[in-house]
Image (cartoon, coloured by chain):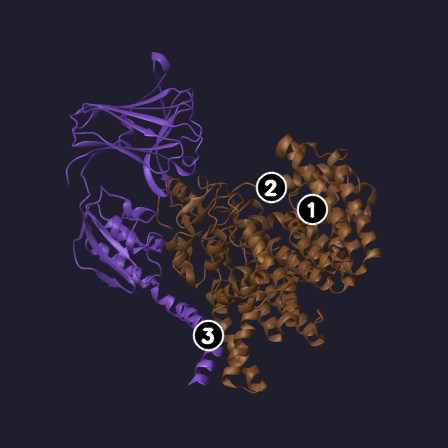
Chain colours: A purple, B brown
Amino acid sequence: MNETVHRLRTAAPALVMVLVALLGLGFQLQLPRAFPSDADYRGVASALAAAPAQGDVVFLHPWWTERARLFFPPDLKVVGYLGHTADDLLEHPRIWVLANERLPRTPDADFRRNFLPDRIPAGPAQQFGPLTLTPYRNGRARRVVLSAADALDRLQVSVEGPAGAAAQPCQRSGSRVQCPFDASVEVAWHEVLYQPVRCLYVLPPSGGRTLSLTLPDGPAADALLLEAGISWEHAWFPDRAPVELRLESSAGVLHLGLPAGREGFVHGETPAVAAGPWTLRLTTADPHDRQLCLRLRALGGPP
Amino acid sequence: MSRAPAPLDRRIALGLGLVTFVVLWATERPVGFVRDESVYFAAAEQFSRWWALLFHRPALALSDAVITQAFDFNHEHPMLMKSLFGWSHTLFYLTLGWVRPAAGFRLPAFAIAALIPTLLHLWGSVLWGRRAGLFAALSFFVVPRQFFHGHLACFDMPVAAMWLLVVYLFWRAEENSRLAPWTGVAFGLALATKHNAFFLPLVLTPFGVLAAWRSASTDGRRLLVRMGQVALAFIAYLGLVLLVKGRSGLVQSWQLLSPQTFGVGALVASLGALSLRLRRRDPAAFVPIAPLVAMGLIGPVVFYMHWPYLWYHPVERLAWYFDFHATHVHYAWTYFGQVLRAPPFPRAYVFVVTAMTLPVSLLLPMGAGIFRTGLRNLGDLIPALGRRFGRGGPTEWLLGVNALFSILLISHPEVPHFGGVKHWLPSMPFLALLAGREFDRAAAGLWSALGLTARRGAAASLAFGAIVLLPAFTLTVHVHPYGTSAYGELAGGIPGAASLGLQRQFWSNNVTGVLPWIDANSRTGARVWLHEVNGLSFRDYQRNDMLRKDVIPTNGPEDADLAAVQYHQEFREQEVLVWQAFGTWVPATGLYLDETPQVVVYRRPPR
């Protein structure tokens, strides 16, 4: 007995090394089983095409499994970015979660904590190889009555000087609104803390002036949702100037501040508004690296 | 125990070196041109033109203006490797036409990288036997990221090789002073390879001085103390200037005719004179510091001589060189879902990334090796530990310090953290060496437990080694040539690392995965934006027939027909800008390694 124990002890380092090597090899051998084939993705695309609905969105889990984009039609929105589990996806009443839980270290805890609240399965899950496609009803969805990004041609844009100086109007130049003091407004895709967003892309005016955007005929809505974020790497600089936003509507004035170093969107929501003008004013002491992505949406109730 | 390897081990080491060289050469073709590499290609070509001028019109070539013109490009790095790249390219591609242009540049890098398994076997076989040496040597290049860096005409793998060479020669010279001058030469070549080598004296001096102190007479110790006083006086002076003038003040005030330059001269002269006196009065105490003296005297001379850019303006340009690296810019780097952009960086970063990128079958013996070395070294200081685990001794300390030095240096929260594992590569050969010892101990234990004969024991060791190395080998084969994307089993492989939010890739070389598609699917004269691929790399892909020559590079997606975006967390905006410019978010193709997007290609829809 003692001899056996002694032998085992002597051989233990080698046995542990062999065991770890075999585990490593086993991991590598089984890993390809987690990878969907092109046919699996095509099967998903067919399933999605078979049950289309307005406002559908595909939500990737894990977030980085973007090879799926290769197989889906251009009119189907696919969401997959770091931090997307916290996205309300409020324009989308139905979310197709395309999950691959066979992948190692799939962030399931994050999915349960941030995605699942207010979302319930709206149908059976379908399996395509390692992929699981499950429709969810989005309890956070709202009816979007109007998005300012879709109303750029109706916006009245001007630059207001400090201390009550007369406002200077901006000029439209193609799809862009060009303003004095290097300010401009356009609708474009940009990234805010890894989230791709189609937004009002605003370069604020210099000299501490205020950019004013007015929609003269805003609709009545349950709320106005204002979101503002600095795009891309410009956001993280801790020594840049803060940006102040003020939204005036029939519901009163909503103040939002975008402090230096803030990455991601800041949000603010008004109470119900009556039909009438909305005016958004934004000011910064120094526009350097203050490229803003703005979303201003009039929201109704659940769709 | 003699520190000289046995003749058979010398031959094995040479064989390992040759095999490494051939394997690196045979597998280099698909390896993309990392951003820096194409800069070094261009620099190497420029410098080889200067060398040609030197032979044809030496007076002109040696003028200050021509030297400045020839060597100003990429003067943030010294010249040794770039000169070798340039000469090799001129000989093997331009003159003989034996290889493609990129291989012409890269051949010297393969040769220098091949030194690592060679030295690991030479050293390991002497310390713990042939089995340990072989395992250490073979294990080094079956680490995917190390295999990748071995291919590049860059400086990270060469400086790891040079670091190992200097430390090995230092160790040998402590026994055989005839090797001391070679230690000095190797140190000079290491300085001429990359700035990491400037830390070598810091690492090696305590070992030489302590060994000298132990064997010194009273007179010898008095001289050693005086040498220490001289060195400390100079360091104190520099500290004072730094305190009074600040970092930039120190850099600016360091002119040719300045107290600092005089101080360096005085330091070298004093230490040289005291060393000579020590050699006369106490030869036994001189032997251990002889390699240090050689490093101090020969190293700087080799460094100065090899770099014409320093010849006319040694002090100012050297001051700039040090300042550049001391204040290096921080590139963004993704770590557990956070984009690290500025210090302070997480202290555990280097340890974590090392653990995540090593194959687990090698991480285990490396970890066990450094742990055992730590215990044994502590055993030198704490008798109770020494009795339980054994004592280290100078060689074990030397290995342990070198295995950890670069790792700890980069772990400093203020030091730039980009570049994956490449910045602490000089630690890795020492970890491989310690892994060799652990493998040897384990194999010996297995042999003994099974009661095998010598012949069967050798066969068992071979099988055991093959099993331990196999997962690393398969991982390396699987990920090649995309080494900057490689992650080990602990991370969950490449997809696991993506879910953990670790850096997906860097240096742009993965674009080679989509170049054949671009060649096959773009019209003649197509305008292509290869994100993160600089203009020099674009040119290199074309001149190495990896991209059609009619394809035109653009600086952004706005005027491109095709865009290939590198997936980096910090560059998400770039991909979104392609959506904006092309009006589509649907890729045409991409390089997806184990499902993870690495390079995503978009095609502008027909108008």
Amino acid at circle 1: Gln
Residue B199 in view: yes
Which residue in the structure is indicated by mark 2? Answer: B326
Amino acid at circle 2: Ala
Question: Mark 1 and mark 2: span between their CA atoms?
Answer: 27 Å
Look at the image and tell me in which quarter the C terminus of chain A lies.
Answer: top left
Q: Is residue B108 above or below residue B134?
A: above
Chain ID, mark 1:
B
Chain ID, mark 3:
A
Q: At x 42% / y 37%, what residue is drawn?
A: A236
Q: At x 46% / y 74%, what residue is drawn?
A: A18
Which residue in the structure is indicated by mark 3? Answer: A18
Q: Is residue A23 above or below residue B104?
A: below
**For the residue labelled by badge 3, is the local secondary structure a helix, a strand or a loop?**
helix
Look at the image and tell me in which quarter the N terminus of chain A lies.
Answer: bottom left
Q: Nearer the viewer, residue A164 or B315?
A: B315
Left or right position of B135 against A177:
right
Q: Nearer the viewer, residue B63 or B559?
A: B63
Q: Quadrant of residue A49?
A: bottom left
**Do discs 3 and 2 belong to a common subunit?**
no
Label 3: how many Cα within 10 Å (few below 14, some 14–19, many 20+) = some
Q: Nearer the viewer, residue B266 or B91?
A: B266
Count of numbered circles in the view: 3
Q: Quadrant of residue B404?
A: bottom right
Left or right position of B352 against B197:
left
Chain ID, mark 2:
B
Which residue in the structure is indicated by mark 1? Answer: B46
Q: Are marks 3 and 1 in contact (CB under 8 Å)?
A: no
Label 1: how many Cα within 10 Å (few below 14, some 14–19, many 20+) = some
Q: Are marks 1 and 2 in contact (CB under 8 Å)?
A: no
